[in-house]
Amino acid sequence: MALWLLRRALAPFFVAMVLAYLLAPPVNRLARWLGRPWGVVAVMLGLVAMMATLLMVLGPWLMDQGAHLGASLPRWRQALDDRILPWLQAHPTWQLRLDQALDGLDPALFLRGLRATGGGVLGCFLDLLALILVPLILYFLLLEGPGLVDRLRDLTPPRYRERLDRMVAAIHQRLGGYIRGQAAVAAAMGVLQGLAFATLGVPYAWLLGLVAGLSNVVPYSPYFTALPPALVLAYLDGGSRGHLLAIAAVFMVVQKAEGFYFTPVWVGRASRLHPLEVLLALTAFGFWFGVLGLIFAVPLAVVLKVVLEEVLLDYKAHPWFSEAP
């Protein structure tokens, strides 16, 4: 309950911790020549430059896609009218149900929805303000990270230090493998889904492929972020029922390839998580921390599983566990 109440306050710290973990290796290398403070500054400036370059490359393309999308809206609305209205006229029962549903809309319910939307906008604004703290927290974590680990080790009783070293090494190995594997899976899925959409003639195929690849960071989310828009765009572009079924089938084939090969081979072996453990982590951390919880659920599950494995080793090493009945 306390974590749920503090989720917005904890979010920037958690994001900074993940970034610090990713940026620690180059900082450690540069620190040998520049000193740690300047190494941290150099890496953070490099990160900013990389993000700016990426924005300069993708920005014009995304703006062009957005402008083209806006220009297509009137045509799609007309196409929707041309396809939906004749179907409703041929099915008067559905026309009656739609009219009854529209007549039954409660204005008060609409106003409550607006208030909820306003609250959501305010929440997003507060989240944005919180994320401004991320660079500052990230700087201090990168600067003092090794010292924090050493102090944690010094505070650990000597008889447990070997175990702590073993746990830290296991977490580092599994998280590193997970991050590298997840990046490779996201890139592969973006290319494969974009190519599949383009081959099937889906409008904005590569934009949808980019969405599928990025959203693949959260397992199973492309089914909600990429497939529905692809089906809607294909339908508005005049796609037949068979065409829509082909899009859905090819999409699911690619996703199954991700589920049965890419993720198990590139990610699963490194993180050592069962699919049920992944689903449990997504459910729990998504409930507690929202979108950020969904993004970072698997890394947190990796850490928790390493700790649990150590607890189980203690349990199995206890004398009464191995005693004969």
Image: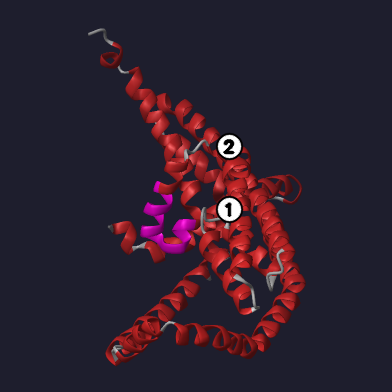
Q: Mark 1 = which residue? A: 20
- Give the secondary structure at mark 2: helix
Q: Is residue 281 magenta?
A: yes
Mark in the foreground, 1 or 2: 2
Q: Quadrant of residue 158?
A: top left
Query: Could you tell me the amino acid type at mark 1?
Result: Ala
| Quadrant placement of the N terminus | bottom left
Q: Is residue 140 above or below residue 306?
A: below
**Dot 1, how many residues are within 10 Å of its Cα: few (below 14), some (14-19), or many (20+)?**
many
Coloration of the structure image? secondary structure
Nearest to the observer: residue 149 or residue 288: 288
Q: CA distance from mark 1 to mark 2?
A: 20 Å
**Residue visible at 66% across and 86% down in the picture:** 72
Q: Main secondary structure of the magenta part?
A: helix
285 drawn magenta: yes
Q: Residue 254 location, x and y as percent?
A: 63, 52
Question: Which residue is the site of mark 2?
Answer: 270
Is any part of residue 236 visible from this angle? yes
The residue stretch that appears in magenta: 280-294
Q: Is residue 23 visible?
A: no
As displayed, is residue 265 above or below residue 310?
below
Amino acid at dot 2: Ala
Give the residue displayed 42% in from the left and 35% down from the top: 307
Task: List x then y, in percent, for residue 263.
Answer: 59, 44
Image vertical order of residue 283 relative to residue 313, above or below: below
Q: Is residue 300 left or right of residue 34?
A: left
